[in-house]
Image (cartoon, helix red, strand yellow):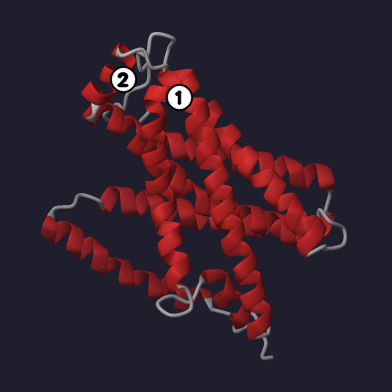
Amino acid sequence: MASVVDIPWVTLTLFLSTLLIPIMISRQLQLCIEKELFVSIGRMFIQLILVGLYLEYLFQINSLAINLAWLLVMLLIGASAIVSKTNLPKKMLLLPTALGLLVGLLPILALICLAVIRPTPVYNAQYLIPLAGMLLGNSLSGNIVALQNLFSSFEQRKAEYEGAIALGASPRFASLPFVREAIQKSLAPSLASMSTMGIVTLPGMMTGQILGGASPMIAIKYQLMIMVAIFVVLSISTTVTLSLAVRICINNNGRILAKPHNN
């Protein structure tokens, strides 16, 4: 297989000029996303450069303690980003979200490293960190959708929820239909993506491995593994997050303590 083709920095910088297209669209339609776009692109650029430099250092050291510490940082930042995007009170929902990601990620990541890929050592940073990043990254949007849908449904269908409470239902039972619907909506994009993969879309991990010189069949096996892992992690994390959110954000009388706030 051919070696990977490097991209010169000058060429990459010139390619970034294509961002003028969404900027023009934003101004034409008054979407007002220019500031957020510049901030997001700037943060992404700086963060990826720093992470790239750090990962080279991390891969060389390959310490179990450092790898686990980096995973914890990734998890906490991911949980914080999820809650921030939902406009819900962080002090109430950061812990449920972080625990949801933790419970979803660790067992599946351990299973992959111990039984599927089996790198040497099993905590090899070259596998552990990128896999954790893919699983967490693909869980962010699903958890955001789940939390937003749950609490917006409480607001929009307030009479339905309060009616169930008035009839004697426990807060947990009264919120179950809302939790169920929120989880269904959070999983829908992943289900659609899996059903069209290989026909409509060529997934990122598979494309990256092929561009990196891997055999297409090896890339396919990795992609199958990662897509199943993403769906399982998302299913577990959203279920745990919403279950804990209901317990923490609804008191014994059924009053919902957490409400979306405006930026």
**Image: 166 above or below 147:** above
Q: Residue at x 18, y 52 (%)?
A: 31
Give the x, y percent position of residue 108.
68, 51
Outermost residue to the bottom: 1
Q: Name which of mark 1 and mark 2 comes first in the sequence.
A: 2
Q: Residue at x 53, y 78 (%)?
A: 8
Give the x, y percent position of residue 240.
55, 35
Outermost residue to the right: 121
Disc 1 and disc 2: Cα gap in Å?
15 Å
Q: Residue at x 78, y 44 (%)?
A: 66
Mark 2 Cα-neighbour bin, 10 Å: few <14, some 14–19, many ≥20:
some
Give the x, y percent position of residue 150.
36, 34
The answer to which of 222 and 85 lies nearer the viewer is 222
Residue type, numbered disc 1: Val
* Picture quarter with the N terminus: bottom right
Residue type, numbered disc 2: Ala
Identify residue for label 2: 164
Give the x, y percent position of residue 263.
28, 31
Q: Residue at x 52, y 70 (%)?
A: 204
Identify residue for label 1: 246
